[in-house]
Image (cartoon, coloured by chain):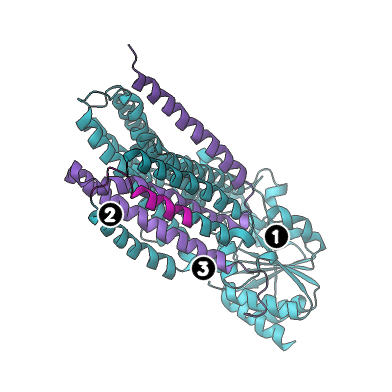
């Protein structure tokens, strides 16, 4: 085959692969078409890989085979055995792998590039350097940033924000130093010492910028790193003139960007606030709320709560991350099935930040065999609460606090919440009266219609199942 | 004076920017239509798709005539990208299989 014929085949493979990726993502707009779409995207990937193997630069397949076999041997078990509660960690570590691949390609590219600089025909080296520098800079900081996010989610290092004086100033200075090296390289691409120093700065920045961010803010961080990994991949496409990489990177970058905006909004936080705020490090922010905590609450037994549930007509479950921590998803579904068999309508209200990454709670409930047509997001479910007999809050707190709507002095004011207080009655399952993540007292506890069921989420849920069965 | 190669290269660079712009725009349009229900599979899917950087890694790992440095960097990159491509598509499918309408038969 001539080089031109090979090149044509490779480009056709890339074109088809790009189309497969777009159609695959479009499949994700509905759970019914999602699997087919992803199958198509995977086929596109295989096609692109086979096409690339025809590339005229490839003279030996030995190392390629080793890389692919070992990679598949590591990747497949991670996908098969990973518990669904650990999907955020897996996602974080896979961003690190993706960024590693991109960074290494960038380094290899730079290495060849500097060795060829003396040759003729290398015209636009400054423009090339923009792409390579961007790729390597964002790639390197995504590697360490993602490893830090992984370690926090996995509990290898404390999930609490780690802060020290002048942290933000130091981080910004480091970022600017790295960026200055990038600019310097664009002007003079031959300075390879500066190139490796820039990688060092970016690697260090990745560690330092995730360090002050708390575990509960991880949905935003993961989404942001997702976006960076995508943009770095797109930059690779620019550097090696590969359109399928540009397309895939742009899609990944756009998706991560959209998700991080959605997550920030759901947490009532600006991007800047998540990245530089070290939220939760000021637990005294609402010390004024302490005085109110003497007010009486209505505490009930599982038996009482069960009879309220069993004689209602409609129930909405409001699950939070505490539910996943207690591994009570299956017990909730069991209770829901019991209620449904009594002719009661059951729905689930899923707040965007109910899990540790975007959409995480939906996956956890789906795993517990909750049908997806019973899962409702914020906008769909909020108008329903006022026609609902009982709302059952389990493992959630701040996202149900009506103060977000009514009290403009509250730190969570303006945060989108589930309007649980509009239901006819509320059963609030909670370990103790301790405040939620934001350190804010929840007005909901003191309402006349709120019944507090204290205890471990799973045990309380099991008690409810037993009691409802007995009725 | 400018050569033809130089002109062609500039044109290519702009074409690349057009591709990026259009892909990002199309991505925005599609992704904003994806329900929050599927946001976790979305993230693992885009992660798997961006493992297409594998195609760049393959060329370095296979071009053994260009020296050991690029072969080694390329091989490690092939490993890292394959981990994501294989793992990413598999776990996405595993999650999507869980989303069912009716569970009466299994419940």
Asked if badges 3 and 1 are on one and the same chain, I answer yes
Q: Is residue A386 left or right of residue A407?
A: right
Q: Compared to A204, does B106 lie above or below?
A: below
Q: Nearer the viewer, mark 3 or mark 1?
A: 3
Give chain A's shade: cyan
Q: Secondary structure at mark 2?
A: helix
Closer to the N terminus: mark 3 or mark 1?
3
The image shows residue A137 at horizontal and vertical percentages of: 35, 37
Query: Would you call the spot at circle 1 few (<14 residues within 10 Å), some (14-19), or many (20 or more)?
Result: many
Q: Quadrant of residue A442?
A: bottom right
* Residue occupying the point 36% across, 35% down: A239
- Identify the chain of the residue marked 2, using the numbered disc in the image: A
Q: Secondary structure at mark 3?
A: helix
Q: Quadrant of residue A160?
A: bottom left
Which chain is drawn using purple? B
Residue at which label 1 appears: A444
Q: Which label belongs to residue A325?
A: 3
Instruction: State the extent of the magenta-drawn residues as a range.
Output: A43-59
Residues B40 and B26: in front is B26
Distance between mark 1 and mark 2 Cα atoms: 59 Å
Residue at which label 2 appears: A64
Closer to the N terminus: mark 3 or mark 2?
2
- Identify the chain of the residue marked 3, using the numbered disc in the image: A
Residues A29 and A45: in front is A45
Is B20 magenta? The answer is no
Distance between mark 3 and mark 2 Cα atoms: 41 Å
Query: Would you call the spot at circle 3 few (<14 residues within 10 Å), some (14-19), or many (20 or more)?
Result: few
Q: Is residue B73 left or right of residue A458?
A: left
Whether residue A53 is visible, yes or no, is yes
* Residue occupying the point 59% across, 68% down: A366
What is the residue that sits farthest to the front in this orientation? A1
């Amino acid at each position: 085959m001539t080089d031109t014929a090979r090149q044509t085949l490779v480009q056709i493979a890339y074109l088809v692969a790009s189309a497969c990726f777009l159609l695959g993502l479009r499949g994700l707009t509905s759970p019914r078409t999602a699997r087919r779409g992803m199958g198509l995207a995977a086929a596109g990937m295989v096609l692109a890989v086979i096409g690339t193997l025809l590339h005229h630069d490839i003279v030996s397949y030995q190392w390629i085979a080793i890389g692919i076999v070992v990679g598949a041997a590591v990747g497949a078990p991670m996908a098969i055995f990973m518990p669904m509660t650990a999907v955020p960690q897996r996602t974080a570590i896979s961003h690190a792998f993706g960024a590693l691949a991109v960074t290494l390609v960038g380094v290899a590219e730079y290495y060849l590039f500097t060795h060829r600089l003396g040759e003729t025909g290398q015209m636009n080296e400054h423009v090339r350097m923009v792409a390579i520098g961007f790729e390597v800079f964002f790639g390197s900081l995504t590697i360490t940033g993602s490893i830090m996010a992984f370690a926090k989610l996995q509990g290898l290092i404390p999930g609490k924000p780690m802060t020290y004086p002048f942290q933000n100033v130091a981080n910004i200075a480091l970022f600017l130093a790295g960026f200055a090296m990038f600019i310097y390289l664009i002007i003079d691409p031959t300075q390879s010492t500066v190139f490796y120093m820039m990688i060092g700065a970016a690697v260090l920045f990745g560690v330092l910028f995730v360090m002050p961010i708390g575990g509960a803010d991880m949905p935003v961080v993961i989404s942001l790193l997702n976006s960076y990994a995508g943009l770095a991949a797109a930059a690779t496409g620019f550097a090696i003139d590969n359109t399928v990489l540009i397309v895939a990177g742009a899609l990944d970058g756009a998706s991560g960007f959209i998700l991080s905006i959605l997550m920030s909004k759901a947490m009532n936080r600006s991007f800047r606030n998540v990245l530089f705020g070290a939220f939760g490090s000021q637990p005294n922010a609402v010390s004024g709320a302490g005085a109110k905590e003497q007010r009486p609450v209505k505490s009930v037994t599982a038996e009482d709560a069960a009879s309220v549930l069993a004689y209602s007509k409609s129930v909405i479950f409001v699950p939070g991350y505490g539910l996943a921590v207690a591994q009570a998803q299956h017990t909730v579904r069991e209770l829901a099935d019991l209620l449904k068999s009594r002719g009661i309508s059951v729905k689930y209200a899923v707040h965007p930040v109910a899990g540790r990454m975007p959409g995480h709670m939906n996956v956890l409930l789906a795993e517990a065999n909750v049908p997806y047509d019973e899962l409702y997001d914020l906008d769909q479910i909020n108008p329903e609460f006022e026609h609902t007999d009982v709302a059952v809050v389990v493992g959630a707190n701040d996202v149900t606090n009506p103060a977000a709507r009514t009290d403009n002095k509250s730190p969570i004011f303006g945060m989108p919440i589930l309007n649980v207080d509009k239901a006819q009655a509320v059963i609030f399952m909670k370990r103790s009266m301790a405040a939620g993540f934001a350190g804010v007292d929840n007005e909901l506890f003191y309402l006349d219609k709120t019944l507090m069921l204290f205890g471990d989420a799973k045990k309380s849920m099991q008690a409810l199942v037993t009691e409802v069965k007995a009725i | 004076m400018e050569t033809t190669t130089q002109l062609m290269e500039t044109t290519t660079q702009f074409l690349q920017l057009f591709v990026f712009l259009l892909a990002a725009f199309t991505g925005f349009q599609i992704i904003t239509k994806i329900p929050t229900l599927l946001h976790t599979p979305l993230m693992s899917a885009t992660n798997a798709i961006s493992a297409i950087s594998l195609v760049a890694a393959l060329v370095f790992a296979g071009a053994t005539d260009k020296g050991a440095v690029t072969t080694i960097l390329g091989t490690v990159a092939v490993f890292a990208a394959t981990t994501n491509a294989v793992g990413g598509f598999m776990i996405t499918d595993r999650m999507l299989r869980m989303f069912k309408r009716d569970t009466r038969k299994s419940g």
